[in-house]
Amino acid sequence: MSATTLAGGKYARELKQVEGIVKKSMEGASGRLKAMLDYLAQGSGKMLRPRLLILAAGLFKDKFSARERAELVHAAAAVELIHTASLVHDDIIDGAARRRGQVALHRRWGEGNAVQAGDYLLAAAFKLLSVKVRVPGLLPLLAETVRAMCRGELEQMKHAFDWQMTEKEYFRLNYLKTGQLLAACCEAGGRVMNASPEELAALRRYGAHLGQEFQLMDDLLDYAASSAALGKPAGSDLSQGVVTLPLIRLLQQEASYRFLLNKAGKVKPLPRKLTRILREAIAESGALDYCYRRAVRFRAAALEALLPFKKGEARRLLAEAAFAVTRQAVLLTGHRL
């Protein structure tokens, strides 16, 4: 979703409040921690997760009451803080050099300090949820989501250099790492609006399918886009032994490349010559087309999950979010079906 999709639209008021709450939640620190939080604020993203939460709520009502708006914006700020904390921690685990066009936090201040900054953001998120949001089931929902994200990272570490990894395992990891948080954001918006169990299930399906689509495109771009377009080094997943669908698909078709990978051993980073060979083979094998088609199927499933809800601005924007994910891949790479 583009940065301006909501900023100048119907939900601009709520989004502006979310930004203010996130900023306020980062205040109160001093010294090195304050410097790190200020640095993170400079590289803030498009706030996709808060947008999804607000749009999910918008499916039920054209205009929010004061109470509903207060619950929504604080819950949305909490999920943005959770997401930002996860990026800080993930970059440490992955050894990432850059994030959102900036030097990664741990590269600038050290791993120990970055861990503390991520922990601070998580604490700030759950303080908001426990003090400012009185929606039944919301705190347990997001607590379980954070647990799932942690499990996803641990399992990804376990599968590093696992050249036998299956598509089923890949999609399960995607759900834990990405899909579950997007599903929880959508469900949270519905919970604030007192949605029925059936409506909450539909919102979760939309978020989960969107998460799979999003992660597929992210993994495709790691092979197909430039470092400048990504704002981080291209090919970083492969060089660090992270197995994603483009590589899984190549190895399904050409098992001989598995021999080269096994011969290289579990070294970080993998030899540049080998990563270049694999990137070229993936581009020529049709693996990227395969990933794109799978993403389009998840997009269709996400759109289907929206059908029970009334037509309106919120549903239109949620549908647009699903289309925007695959459109971005086309814009950054020129990749088409």
Image (spheres, grey):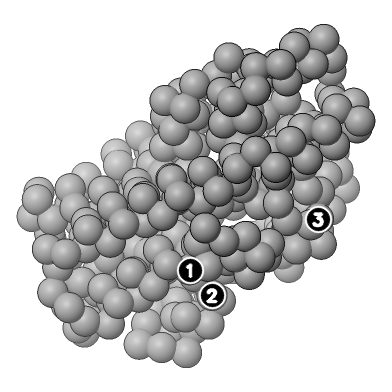
Q: Real-space Cα distance between discs 1 and 3?
A: 20 Å
* CB contact under 8 Å: marks 1 and 3: no
Q: Is residue 337 left or right of residue 134?
A: right
x, y (%) of residue 6?
44, 80
Q: Which mark is residue 137?
A: none
Residue 229 lies in what quarter of the image?
bottom right
x, y (%) of residue 238?
74, 33
Q: Residue at x 33, y 69 (%)?
A: 319
Element at label 2:
loop
x, y (%) of residue 5?
47, 80
Q: Is residue 183 left or right of residue 24?
A: left
Q: Residue at x 53, y 82 (%)?
A: 4
Q: Residue at x 51, y 51 (%)?
A: 292
Q: Is residue 186 above or below residue 66?
A: above
Element at label 3:
helix
Using a 10 Å C-alpha cutoff, classify the residue at mark 3 as few (fewer than 14 neighbours), some (14 to 19) or many (20 or more): some
Going from N to C along the chain, the mark reached first, 2 or 1, is 2
Circle 2 is placed at which residue position?
2
Going from N to C along the chain, the mark reached first, 2 or 3, is 2
- Between 33 and 327, the residue placed more toward the observer is 327
Using a 10 Å C-alpha cutoff, classify the residue at mark 2 as few (fewer than 14 neighbours), some (14 to 19) or many (20 or more): few
Circle 1 is placed at which residue position?
324
Circle 3 is placed at which residue position?
227
Residue flagged by tag 3: what amino acid is it?
A: Ser
Q: Is residue 287 above or below residue 310?
A: above
Using a 10 Å C-alpha cutoff, classify the residue at mark 1 as few (fewer than 14 neighbours), some (14 to 19) or many (20 or more): some
Q: Is any part of residue 8 visible from this angle?
A: yes
x, y (%) of residue 83?
53, 50
* CB contact under 8 Å: marks 2 and 1: yes
Q: Is residue 313 left or right of residue 179?
A: left
Q: Is any part of residue 82 visible from this angle?
A: no
